[in-house]
Amino acid sequence: MKIEQIEISSLELPYKKAFITATNRFVTAQGLLVKVVSDDGLEGYGYADLFPRTGESQESARHAIESVIKPAIMGGDLREWLRLRKKIDHLITGNPRAKAALETACYDALAKGMRVPLYLLLGGLFRNGITIIKMLGVDDPEAMAEEARRLVGEGFTALKLKMSGKVALDLKRVAKVRDAVGGGLFIKVDANEAYDAKTAIRLAKGLAELAVEVFEQPVPRSQIEALGEVKRHSPIKIEADQSVRTAADAYRLIQNRLVDGINTSIQKAGGIGEVRRIAELCELAGIQCALSNTAGSMVGDAAALHLAASIPAIAPLCELGEFESISGDPFVGLKVDKGFLKLPEGEGLGVKLKERS
């Protein structure tokens, strides 16, 4: 099961509706599809979503894989992936999304070679799917409320509202959504680093009155002391996202009790192994670890779903399924049904390329 080919292609997948956060306005999901082919003809796929705030671009990710990583691992045995990964990390630091896409492709090919679904390589089955936290982008309060009402009608039971950084307007957004969906629905909000600590604390108190469960990344990623200040004074749970890139980042926050939870992803962390380390640290510390993925090819969601299915430490509510927000995905095999993403059948990731007509 040796690596015979590594191929990279660009994907540009239009959003069905522009998705707006405090830091980005997405109209197209731009990423790289990585294909690994073994010497016995098996194909594995991985995907990296790439935009400026990730610190990686299509050009940089392509260069990292083609010019640095590929020459070092061609001919390597997929059954020795951990050894190959160690070699990759020695050769090139950073570039987590490029590495994650390649790693996913290797795992997909390896699982297909062993004729098993990926979750069996990752520890076995703990759950057969994930309840989706559906994301709503920044919009007028009334428009967000209407969208939330529609999503609840489709069966979603958990929502994540993006914030703009303007306290009064953000509170109005949440209030309108809460009125639209009623008191029992799970709601979290995501500031994407938009506030300073004192403003975030003020917002958190208003969010508590609206029965919001979780406040994600209220302050800039590097301001971990400010993150801890918000956590100490907030009546609702504070979750880190951009502040945690690696297991070492997670350890620092956990050790100092600076957050109530961590939201991570395979792409942000740089691979399946690093997410497992983060999740297990969270479990040991008694805090929640959620898994997320931005909109893009369902290849990325499939990898996250297999990982979530095999790790008890991952929360049962995760931010997956955003592939349904874009069009043009060349893969099939996943579908969100009434707010639930079921683990697919089949070998490897369980998704496949659409048949060409």
Image (spheres, grey):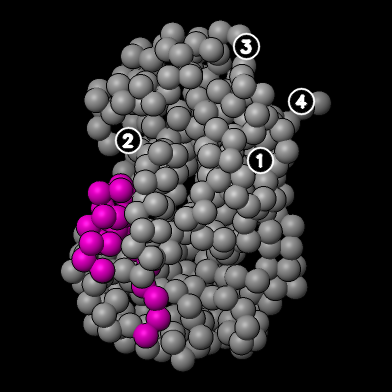
At 28% across and 62% down in the image, what residue appears?
254
Q: Which residues are magenta?
A: 235-257
Could you say which quadrant of the image residue 182 lies in? bottom right
At 46% across and 91% down in the image, what residue appears?
209
Q: Amino acid at mark 1?
A: Gly
Mark 3 or 4, which is nearer the eye? 3
Q: Is residue 320 left or right of residue 166?
A: right
Element marked by disc 3: loop
Magenta span contains residue 132: no
Distance of label 3 from label 1 (alpha carbons): 26 Å
Locate residue 345, reporting x and y percent. Answer: 73, 38
- Which residue in the protein does label 4 denote? 356
- Which residue in the protein does label 2 denote? 95
Task: Judge whether residue 145 can be spotted in this image.
Answer: no
Q: Amino acid at mark 2?
A: Asn
The residue lying furthest to the bottom in this view is: 209
Element marked by disc 2: loop
Distance of label 3 from label 2 (alpha carbons): 28 Å
Q: For the residue carrying disc 3, how many other residues have a C-alpha within 10 Å: few (<14), some (14-19), or many (20+)? A: some
- Which residue in the protein does label 1 denote? 328
Q: Amino acid at mark 4?
A: Arg
Magenta span contains residue 252: yes
Mark 2 or 4, which is nearer the eye? 2
The one of 2 and 11 positioned closer to us in this rendering: 2
**Disc 1 and disc 2 in contact, CB within 8 angstroms:** no
Distance of label 1 from label 2 (alpha carbons): 26 Å
Look at the image and tell me in which quarter the C terminus lies.
top right
- Which residue in the protein does label 3 denote? 41
Q: Could you tell which of marks 3 and 4 lies nearer the N-terminus? A: 3
Q: Could you tell which of marks 3 and 1 lies nearer the N-terminus? A: 3
